[in-house]
Amino acid sequence: MALVHLNTLDSSILNQIPLSIRLSVGSDSVELEELPLSIQYIIREYVSETVEEIFVPEEIYDVRPKINPYNDLTALQTKKEAVIEYLENYFCCKRGIYPFDPEFGNMLHTHLQKKDTSLRQTLVGAELASIIRLINQSFDGTISVISSQIYPIDIGGAVEYNLGVTIKVDDETIKLNTGNK
């Protein structure tokens, strides 16, 4: 079933559609199969003439839930883009809040608050190693953590921590920060 957006049709095509049909639709979109056959034919002819050739890259690693100009998801075309997207999503997801897999997520928010700096660095390193191990399974083991640093930020009476991570993806170095540093 094809959905037709009447507001995207050319005015010459809209003039061929009876006003009673345009008014009965009520909204800007209608199922093509609900229209009379003669109108379906006119619209299909118009659409077949105006279809642009869309470039599809040879290699797409994943998609981002951001709508592109073609009303489709945005493709992640490089391994670097995919790894950055995976890590940003992982850093935002605390363990236990993902409804379909309560074991998915990280405990960075609790590890960063530890007072013992060596324990904190060890636990953060273990979290990073586990997510990199998961991502490496998808990308044939080409990703590694070069360094990770914890930056304390004093906010009056409290301290927040940001995590800076440097990773290597196919001989390219990427620096990520979990906060606004």
Image: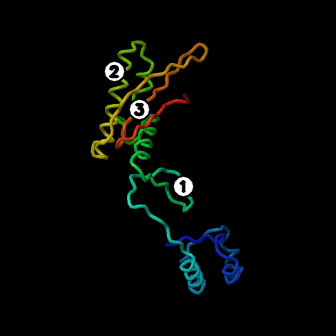
Choose between 103 and 107: the one closer to the eye. Answer: 107
- At mark 2, the secondary structure is helix
State the residue at coordinates (33%, 39%). 143
Please name the amino acid that badge 1 sits on: Ile
Label 1 to label 3, Cα distance in Å?
29 Å
Distance Cα–Cα, label 1 vs label 2: 39 Å
CB atoms of marks 1 and 3 within 8 Å: no
Q: Which of marks 1 and 3 is in front?
A: 3
Q: Is mark 3 on a helix, strand or loop?
A: strand
Viewer-side label of 2, 3: 3
Report whether 45 appears left or right of 123: right
Q: Which amino acid does label 3 sit on?
A: Thr
* Sequence-wise first label, 1 or 2: 1
Q: Is residue 134 left or right of residue 54?
A: left
Residue neighbourhood size for the residue with mark 1, other residues' Cα within 10 Å, grouped as few (<14), some (14–19), many (≥20): few
Helix, strand or loop for disc 1: strand
Task: Give the residue type at disc 2.
Answer: Thr
Q: Kindly identify which numbered label has been placed on residue 67.
A: 1
Depth check: 55 or 159 in front? 55
The circle on residue 166 is 3
